Amino acid sequence: MTGAARRRLAAGLLLACLAATARAEAVTEIRYADREPDGSTYQSRILIAGERMRMDYGRDDEDFILYDRKAKAVYLVAHLARRITEIAAAKPTVKTPKGWRVKLDSQPSGKDRLTQARLNDKLCAEFKNADLLRDEARLMADFRQALSANQAAAWAATPAELRDGCQWLMDVKEAGAEYRRGLLLALRQADGRSRVYQSHAGREVPADLFALPADYTRMRIGGTETRGGGK
């Protein structure tokens, strides 16, 4: 191979490497084991890149939720339906019902911190946090708060006899409380739901995992459907 050929080959390899780098996104990956009230379990994967967060069940090609803090929006992407549902981030004006008492008790638990959330002395949730990944945890808390207005509307539309005060506490009044003090290690809620930390690591993933398909139908909660306009 001539010197010129070697130089062309080296340049081609460099361009290929640069292209591969451009297609990659450096993220923090956090994995949890989740349990529903009926006992069913599943794995949750959370990928965080700066101001954006993708939530799925561990597969790159599946439906996902994307929270973009700068855009102040949450997107639900459904591939089979080729649909993106957008929920504008909003925080409700919360008025605590008369006679309701909210209390969050937090105390050290070894190197970690244990918090109990109570409504009228009923234990609604108990969670433990480690002093790790503060920025990532803050983004997760902001995501929960971004949905709190939507949750408040759903709660208000529920017949009074069916309303769950603990749901109001954790999804509206104190939305995101379980992520305010750092990396969530464990969460147990009164309705039987739970989340247990599995692992976290820095890695690179394809950048298009954070992309919204441009040709999907888009629907904004409370708005109308539009076509295209991915961002």
Image: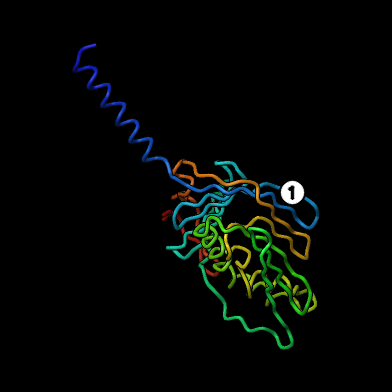
Q: Nearer the viewer, residue 127 or 67?
A: 127
Q: Residue at x 58, y 64 (%)?
A: 181
- Would residue 198 appear left or right of 54 to someone viewing this image? right
Q: Residue at x 22, y 21 (%)?
A: 7
View extreme (top): residue: 1
View extreme (left): residue: 4
- Would residue 225 appear left or right of 5 to someone viewing this image? right
Query: What colouring style does the render use?
Result: rainbow
Q: Residue at x 62, y 68 (%)?
A: 177
- Would residue 146 appear left or right of 127 to someone viewing this image? left
Q: Amino acid at mark 1?
A: Thr
Q: Disc 1 marks which residue?
A: 41
Is 143 situated above or below 92? above
Q: x, y (%) of residue 151?
A: 63, 70
Q: Residue at x 46, y 65 (%)?
A: 72
- Would residue 75 appear left or right of 11 to someone viewing this image? right
Q: x, y (%) of residue 152?
A: 63, 74
Question: What is the crowding at mark 1: few (fewer than 14 residues within 10 Å), some, or many (at least 20)?
Answer: some
Q: x, y (%) of residue 85?
A: 54, 59
Check disc 1 and report its element: helix, strand or loop: strand
View extreme (front): residue: 110
Q: Which quadrant: the N terminus?
A: top left
Is 169 situated above or below 112? below
Q: Nearer the viewer, residue 145 or 223?
A: 145
Q: Nearer the viewer, residue 219 or 185?
A: 185
Q: Which quadrant: the C terminus?
A: bottom left
